[in-house]
Amino acid sequence: MTTLQSIRKLGFRRWYERLLIEAHAWLVTCFLALVLAVALFETHNDAVALIQRISLLTGAGFSVIGAWFAYRRYFLSLQRAEIFGEGASCPRCAAYGKLQVESIRQDAAGDVIQVAACCRKCGHQWRIGE
Ligand SMILES: [Zn+2]
Protein backbone atom coordinates (compact mmCIF):
# COMPACT_ATOMS: atom_id res chain seq x y z
CA MET A 1 0.00 0.00 0.00
CA THR A 2 1.40 3.37 -0.99
CA THR A 3 1.59 6.27 1.44
CA LEU A 4 -1.23 8.07 -0.38
CA GLN A 5 -3.49 5.02 -0.12
CA SER A 6 -2.48 4.61 3.50
CA ILE A 7 -3.35 8.25 4.35
CA ARG A 8 -6.63 8.06 2.43
CA LYS A 9 -7.58 4.78 4.11
CA LEU A 10 -6.60 5.73 7.67
CA GLY A 11 -7.12 9.48 7.55
CA PHE A 12 -4.35 11.95 8.28
CA ARG A 13 -4.59 11.78 12.07
CA ARG A 14 -4.30 7.97 12.29
CA TRP A 15 -1.55 7.92 9.66
CA TYR A 16 0.33 10.54 11.69
CA GLU A 17 -0.22 8.56 14.89
CA ARG A 18 1.18 5.45 13.23
CA LEU A 19 4.18 7.44 11.98
CA LEU A 20 4.93 8.41 15.58
CA ILE A 21 4.51 4.82 16.79
CA GLU A 22 6.84 3.61 14.02
CA ALA A 23 9.42 6.24 15.01
CA HIS A 24 9.38 5.14 18.63
CA ALA A 25 9.54 1.46 17.63
CA TRP A 26 12.81 2.35 15.87
CA LEU A 27 14.04 4.00 19.07
CA VAL A 28 13.26 0.84 21.07
CA THR A 29 15.03 -1.23 18.40
CA CYS A 30 18.07 1.04 18.70
CA PHE A 31 18.12 0.61 22.48
CA LEU A 32 17.79 -3.20 22.26
CA ALA A 33 20.56 -3.39 19.65
CA LEU A 34 22.85 -1.38 21.95
CA VAL A 35 22.03 -3.68 24.90
CA LEU A 36 22.83 -6.68 22.70
CA ALA A 37 26.12 -5.09 21.60
CA VAL A 38 27.16 -4.44 25.21
CA ALA A 39 26.13 -7.95 26.27
CA LEU A 40 28.13 -9.55 23.45
CA PHE A 41 31.13 -7.35 24.21
CA GLU A 42 30.95 -8.21 27.93
CA THR A 43 30.79 -11.93 27.13
CA HIS A 44 33.98 -11.58 25.12
CA ASN A 45 37.03 -12.27 27.34
CA ASP A 46 40.29 -14.25 27.33
CA ALA A 47 38.69 -17.42 28.75
CA VAL A 48 36.79 -18.27 25.55
CA ALA A 49 38.29 -19.73 22.38
CA LEU A 50 39.58 -17.44 19.65
CA ILE A 51 36.86 -18.39 17.14
CA GLN A 52 34.20 -17.70 19.78
CA ARG A 53 35.77 -14.33 20.61
CA ILE A 54 35.79 -13.37 16.93
CA SER A 55 32.12 -14.30 16.52
CA LEU A 56 31.16 -12.38 19.70
CA LEU A 57 32.98 -9.26 18.56
CA THR A 58 31.50 -9.59 15.06
CA GLY A 59 28.02 -9.87 16.60
CA ALA A 60 28.71 -6.81 18.76
CA GLY A 61 29.87 -4.89 15.69
CA PHE A 62 26.76 -5.78 13.70
CA SER A 63 24.61 -4.81 16.70
CA VAL A 64 26.24 -1.37 16.79
CA ILE A 65 25.62 -0.99 13.04
CA GLY A 66 22.00 -2.07 13.55
CA ALA A 67 21.62 0.41 16.41
CA TRP A 68 22.97 3.22 14.20
CA PHE A 69 20.57 2.27 11.38
CA ALA A 70 17.63 2.18 13.85
CA TYR A 71 18.64 5.56 15.28
CA ARG A 72 18.76 7.07 11.77
CA ARG A 73 15.26 5.73 11.01
CA TYR A 74 14.00 7.05 14.37
CA PHE A 75 15.46 10.48 13.73
CA LEU A 76 14.14 10.73 10.15
CA SER A 77 10.66 9.46 11.11
CA LEU A 78 10.44 11.92 13.98
CA GLN A 79 11.65 14.77 11.79
CA ARG A 80 9.00 13.90 9.19
CA ALA A 81 6.31 13.65 11.88
CA GLU A 82 7.27 17.09 13.16
CA ILE A 83 7.00 18.66 9.69
CA PHE A 84 3.59 17.11 8.99
CA GLY A 85 2.32 17.71 12.51
CA GLU A 86 3.10 21.42 12.26
CA GLY A 87 1.53 21.71 8.81
CA ALA A 88 -1.67 19.80 9.57
CA SER A 89 -3.57 22.90 10.70
CA CYS A 90 -5.58 24.72 8.04
CA PRO A 91 -4.00 28.18 7.46
CA ARG A 92 -7.47 29.73 6.94
CA CYS A 93 -9.70 28.21 9.66
CA ALA A 94 -7.06 26.57 11.94
CA ALA A 95 -8.83 23.17 11.97
CA TYR A 96 -6.21 20.60 13.02
CA GLY A 97 -5.94 17.34 11.07
CA LYS A 98 -9.25 17.82 9.26
CA LEU A 99 -7.70 17.52 5.84
CA GLN A 100 -8.10 15.51 2.71
CA VAL A 101 -4.90 14.50 0.95
CA GLU A 102 -4.98 15.52 -2.71
CA SER A 103 -1.54 14.27 -3.76
CA ILE A 104 1.79 13.21 -2.30
CA ARG A 105 5.35 13.78 -3.51
CA GLN A 106 7.85 11.12 -2.43
CA ASP A 107 11.62 10.86 -2.63
CA ALA A 108 13.51 7.96 -4.22
CA ALA A 109 13.36 5.95 -0.98
CA GLY A 110 9.56 6.24 -0.90
CA ASP A 111 9.44 8.67 2.01
CA VAL A 112 6.81 11.42 1.84
CA ILE A 113 8.37 14.85 1.28
CA GLN A 114 5.31 16.94 0.44
CA VAL A 115 1.54 16.58 0.78
CA ALA A 116 -1.03 18.67 -1.08
CA ALA A 117 -3.92 19.04 1.36
CA CYS A 118 -7.47 20.34 1.22
CA CYS A 119 -9.35 21.38 4.37
CA ARG A 120 -12.51 19.32 4.90
CA LYS A 121 -14.03 22.19 6.87
CA CYS A 122 -13.52 25.25 4.63
CA GLY A 123 -12.07 23.83 1.36
CA HIS A 124 -8.80 25.80 1.54
CA GLN A 125 -5.84 24.10 -0.21
CA TRP A 126 -2.23 24.19 0.97
CA ARG A 127 0.99 22.18 0.92
CA ILE A 128 2.66 20.44 3.85
CA GLY A 129 6.41 19.80 3.80
CA GLU A 130 9.27 21.43 1.87
ZN1 LIG B 1 -9.96 25.20 6.84
Image: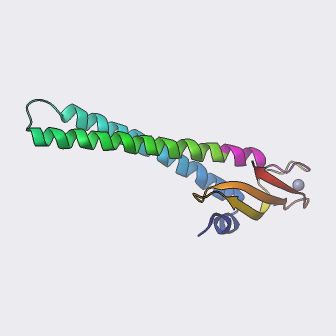
User: In the rendered view, does 4 fall on the left or right side of 37?
Assistant: right
Question: Between 109 and 47, which is closer to the camera in this rendering?
Answer: 109
Magenta segment, which residues? Answer: 82-92
Residue 86 x, y percent position in the rendering? 75, 44
The location of residue 51, given as percent across then percent down, is 12, 43
22 vs 113, left or right, is left
User: Along the line of sight, which residue is nearer the eye, 8 or 53?
Assistant: 53
Any part of residue 72 in sight: yes
- Residue 12 vs 33, above or below: the answer is below
Residue at image point 76% right, 64% down: 103
Numbered disc total = 0
Quadrant for the N terminus in the image: bottom right
Q: Nearer the viewer, residue 52 or 84?
A: 52
Colouring: rainbow
- Residue at position x 9%, y 36% in the image: 48
Q: Is residue 74 above or below residue 17?
A: above
> In the image, is 112 to the left or to the right of 28?
right
Q: Quadrant of residue 10?
A: bottom right
Give coordinates of residue 9: x percent, y percent: 67, 69
Which of the two residues, 95 or 48, is positioned nearer the viewer here? 48
Instruction: Tell me residue 2's x, y (percent).
Output: 62, 67
Q: Quadrant of ligand 1?
A: bottom right
Please, is residue 58 above or below residue 113 in the view? above
31 magenta-colored: no
Q: Is residue 86 magenta?
A: yes
Query: What residue is drawn where x is 80% and y is 59%?
Result: 117
Snapshot quadrant of residue 6: bottom right
Q: Residue shown at 22%/31% (left/top)?
A: 42
Residue furthest to the top in view is 46
